[in-house]
Amino acid sequence: MKNIFKIVFLGIIGFGLLAYLTAPKNPNKNEIDQNKKVLNIDFIPGHFDLVSNNPYTKAETLFKKGVEKYIIVLNHDSLVLFKDLYKYTDKNIVLIANISNTPWLIKQLAVNGKLEEMYKNSKIPLINDSNGFFMNSLDLKDNTQNKYFIYKLNSDGTIIKTDEGLVELNSLEKGISEENSKISLEQIVKSL
């Protein structure tokens, strides 16, 4: 019996070492030049999870050179505000749900379904950034719960940060009034 435990224990240690030593270093091989800080379309992950669509969507379906687009990164609480953005603008926008800091089990059990439910009527595509690849590719380190970030993808392929803002703290749990939502979204649309 003692030998069986030794074999199982050594097998687990061996498997862990094998997984650690053979894991890829960085799935996004493009490195941001810290001196230039110029982001471009090449830094966008090649594949991502599009909510209410294909969990393995190619970047070319949403991001192309020559097409201007706004990229809005939504942290936890800002998700509830932007679900109605499609009612206020017809600009070319992609929303990114930054849920990379959410525990894995919660992501699997609740977050994916909640995102689909919240954005089922939205005409604006929502990317589920559960692994943080978009955060890394945009060189974004701020995970403040009630913050959002607006980037513009220019026709030449460069990406620039144009704005950032805050929503009411804990608005995902408490909700947000229709009036406050309308006022906030109208202000955001003016800044686009």
Image (tube, helix red, strand yellow):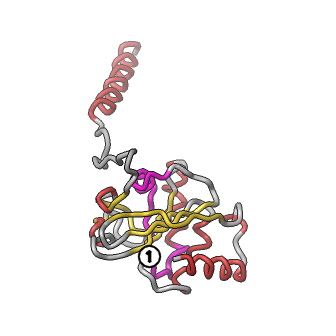
Q: Element type at marker 1?
A: strand
Q: Position of residue 138 (x, y in %)?
A: 42, 56
Left or right side of 183 for 119:
left
Horizontal side of 39 relative to 144 (left or right) equals: left
Viewer-nearest residue: 47 or 30: 30
* Residue bearing the label numbered 1: 93
Can the viewer see residue 40?
yes
Residue at horizontal 33%, vertical 31%? 20
Q: Is residue 138 magenta?
A: yes
Q: Answer yes or no: is residue 84 visible.
A: no
Q: Does the magenta stretch include residue 131?
A: yes
53 is higher (above) or lower (below) than 46: below
The span picked out in magenta is 117-140
Residue type of the residue flagged with mark 1: Ile
Q: Position of residue 134 (x, y in %)?
A: 41, 56
Q: Nearer the viewer, residue 188 or 169?
A: 188
Q: Residues within 10 Å of mark 1 (few under 14, many from 20)?
A: many
Please identify the quarter of the rendering in which residue 24 is found. top left
Find residue 167 and report its image quarter.
bottom right
Dividing the image into 4 quarters, which one contains the N terminus? top left
Q: Is 57 rendered above or below residue 139? A: below
